[in-house]
Amino acid sequence: MSLIVMATGGTGGHIYPAVATARELMGRGHQALLLGQRGGMEERFAADSGLDFHGVDAGKLARSGQGRPDPRELLRAARGVAEARAFLRETRPEAVVGYGGFASLPGVLAAQSLGLPTVLHEQNARLGLTQRLAVGRARAVGTAYPKVVGLNPDKATQVGMPVREERLPRTEALARLGLREGALTVLVMGGSQGSLALNNGVPDVLRSVFGAEGRTSDGQPVQVLHSTGPRWIDEVAPRVADLGWYHPVPYVNAVAAWSAADFGITRAGTGTLAEAAFHGVPLIMVPLPESAENHQFHNAQSVQEAGAGRLVEQSDLAGALGGAVLECAQPGTRAAMREAALGRSPAGAAARLADLVLRHVR
C-alpha cells in the first residue's frame, strides 16, 4: 500500500483539491496524508475530513516595500523545508503532490531534495510563483485549464479542478444548515477566509432587493446563508440582526451549502467556480481585484460567456449587484444558468489527477 503525501495549504482553493485527491487515492487502497503549515487552516480541514496531517513551518514569499523577500519569511520557509525533509526521510512516501501556495513549498522542495517523485497541480491559467520554483524537477503537472502560461506543454496534462464529489439531497442539506424548505436560498461566500468587500457590500444590497420581509417580487420567501469568515462574523451579524431571513455564519459545510443553494454570490477563484459547476449552482461573481495576473476576472468572464453566471466588478458592487440578483431570482433564467453550470462540471478530476500521480510513483 503506497503512501502519497499532499503538500498543500494556505487557502481553501489549494486545500479542497488536495482533500478530494487524497480521498480518491484512499478509495483505491493507498494511504494519503496532508503536509502543510503547522496551525494553518489545512490542519483543521484535514481533521474535519478524517485525514492524517503533518505540520511544518512555512514562510510567505511576499515582497517587502523594497521589492525583496522578507528575510524572516525566508528563514521560516527554510526551517519548513528542513522539517519536511526529516518527515519525508522517515516516512518515505511513494510520491508528493504539490498544490501551489506558500504552504505547499516546504513539502515539495524537501521531496525533490530527497529524490522523491513530485507531481504538481496548477489550478490557474498562469503558473504560480511557488510552482515555478518546483516545476523544473517535477515529473508532471496536472492542470485545470487546457493551456497554462509559463508551463511547458510537454509536462502538462489537463485533469480539471478536483472537488469533493459529494452531493446531498436538498431537504437534507437545508436541515443540516438550519434552513427552511420552500424559500429561494442564496449563498454568499467569499472563500474559506471570507471577503471583507462582500461582507460590507452584499447585506445592504440584498436588504434593498428583498425588503425587510425577505421576499422576491412574486412573493416567494428568501433566505440567505452568508459565510463571513471567522474574522468578520462579529461585524456582519449585528448589521442583519433585524432580518430573520438573513443567516450569517463564520464558515459553512461547503457540500451542504452548495447542495442547498439556488444561486451564489462569490469570488471567482478556480476552486469556487469548480464546486459551483459540480453542483449546478448559478453564480454572481465578484472577482478579487488583487488576484495575481487578474486571473479571477478572466475566470469569471469565462463562466459568464458560458451562460453559467454574471460578473460584477467590485468597484461597481453597489450599482450592479442588485440587478444581477433580480435576474438570478427569476426561475427561468436560473434554470438556464444551472444547465450551463452543469455543462462545466469537473466531475472525475480527482480520479484523473490520481491516475497521473500513480503513473509517476516510485
Image (tube, grey):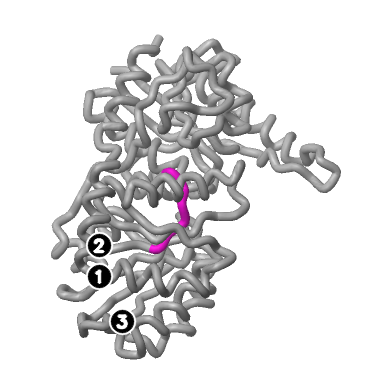
> What residue is disc 2 on?
334
Cα–Cα span, label 3 and label 2: 21 Å
> What residue is disc 1 on?
330
With respect to residue 28, does 288 lie above or below?
Answer: below
Q: Residues within 10 Å of mark 1 (few under 14, many from 20)?
A: few
Disc 1 vs disc 2: Cβ atoms closer than 8 Å?
yes
Task: Return the disc, 3 or 1, that comes first in the chain's sequence.
Answer: 3
Q: Nearer the viewer, residue 317 or 65?
A: 317
Badge 1 amino acid = Gln
Badge 3 amino acid = Trp
For image coordinates 14% across by 57% down, the residue present is: 169
Place of residue 298 in the rendered image (x, y in percent of width and height, measured from the top left): 50, 45
Cα–Cα span, label 3 and label 1: 19 Å
Which quadrant is home to the N terminus? top left
Query: Which mark's residue is nearer the viewer, 3 or 1?
Result: 1
Name the secondary structure under disc 1. loop
Cα–Cα span, label 1 and label 2: 6 Å
**Extent of the magenta region:** 265-270
**Was residue 127 drawn as part of the magenta stretch in this picture?**
no
